[in-house]
Image (spheres, grey):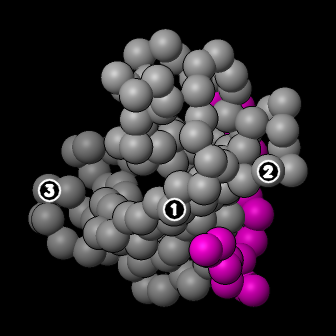
Amino acid sequence: MRMSLPEEKKWVHTMVIPIRWGDMDAMGHVNNTIYFRYLETIRIDWMEAIRCAPTPTGEGPVIVNAFCNFYKQLVFPGDVLAKMYVSDPGRSSFESWCTLSLTTDPDTIYAEGGATTVWVNFPLQKSAPIPEALLAHIR
């Protein structure tokens, strides 16, 4: 069953992530936990690219819910083509979505997932309004 991305999603970032030998498990395919690492990698790469990177002594994103649907096995060697989308900006949260393909097979989605992200003031351990600079990229 394929995930349906919200109609109001906005494409924001694409990157290539090399599959490492160590990403595979004893079954000979990329371990399911690594897919979440790929989703995290593109989220942080996007935030750095738009100059909204988290600062551990200040503010940044906290993932409060994450999911991944697996359709086809990824194996080494290869390069993952990750495409990230965002939607549903609120005062302190937004949704992120990602599709994972191979650069050699970009039309086949191997997995797709997403996360609910809350912007947090780390010293106060409380949600905070999404900064305008970030919000401009989400809207």
76 to 13, vertically: above or below: above
In this picture, residue 79 sits left or right of residue 24: right
Residue placed at 26% from the left, 43% from the top?
Answer: 56
Q: Residue at x 42, y 72 (%)?
A: 116
Disc 3: which residue: 123
**Foreground residue among 32 and 90:** 32
Looking at the image, residue 139 lies above or below residue 58: below
Pick the quarter of the image with the N terminus. Answer: bottom right
Which numbered disc, 3 or 1, marks the residue that appears first in the sequence? 1
Farthest residue, direction left: 124
Q: Which amino acid type corresponds to the residue marked 1 in the rendered image? A: Asn
Q: Residue at 39% x, 78% y: name it.
A: 92
Mark 2 or 1, nearer chain start: 1
Q: Position of residue 27 (x, y in %)?
A: 40, 28
The kind of residue tagged 2 is Thr
> Which residue is under mark 1?
69
Q: Which residue is mark 2?
A: 108
Q: Name the quadrant containing residue 17.
A: top right
The residue tagged with tag 1: helix, strand or loop?
strand
User: Where is residue 105, by image quadrant?
Assistant: top right
Front position among marks 2 and 3 = 2
Q: Give the image quarter of residue 10.
A: bottom right
Seen from the viewer's position, the closer of residues 29 and 103 is: 29
Q: Residues within 10 Å of mark 3 (few under 14, many from 20)?
A: few
Q: Residue at x 51, y 48 (%)?
A: 39
Q: CA distance from mark 3 to mark 1?
A: 34 Å
